[in-house]
Amino acid sequence: MAADDEYVYDEVTGEWRPASEVAAAAAKAAEVCDAAGNVLVDGDSVTLIKDLKVKGANQTLKQGTVIRSIRLTENPEEIDCRHDTIKGLVLRTEFVRKR
């Protein structure tokens, strides 16, 4: 152990861990993945893997519908997107697959 290593207290485990290890774990947790485990980024196109009823729009998005130009949100389980007939649409990543 070198004296110049930075350590950070991890409240979850109750241990002091190297800062680089904590940063790598945070980056991994921040990755947004689709239902198949593919990493999503802003601007990707996704396909719905099941029919979804849209609350407040009285409409159902069918399986296979392509959604273009997604935007990631602060929540890694949700993506912000726009459909031709629905603006301000937020989808859960468990219902989409990257194209």
Image (cartoon, helix red, strand yellow):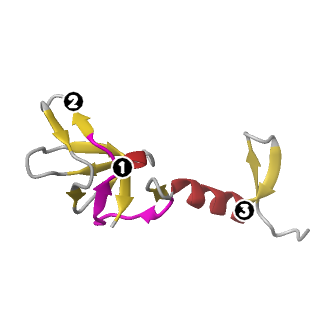
- Left or right side of 61 for 26: right
Which residue is most to the left?
A: 85
What residue is at 31 percent from the left and 66 percent from the top? Answer: 44
What residue is at 13 percent from the left and 45 percent from the top? Answer: 87
Label 3 to label 1, Cα distance in Å?
24 Å
Could you say whether the residue bearing mark 3 is in a helix, strand or loop?
helix
x and y, in percent, of residue 92 in the image = 37, 44
Amino acid bearing label 3: Glu
- Left or right side of 8 for 35: left
Residue under numbered circle 2? 55
The numbered mark, 3 or 1, whose residue comes first in the sequence reads: 3
x and y, in percent, of residue 73 in the image = 36, 49
Q: Residues within 10 Å of mark 3 (few under 14, many from 20)?
A: few
x and y, in percent, of residue 14 in the image = 81, 40
What's the mark number on residue 21?
A: 3
What residue is at 23 percent from the left and 63 percent from the top? Answer: 69
Residue under numbered circle 1? 73
Amino acid bearing label 1: Thr
Amino acid bearing label 2: Lys
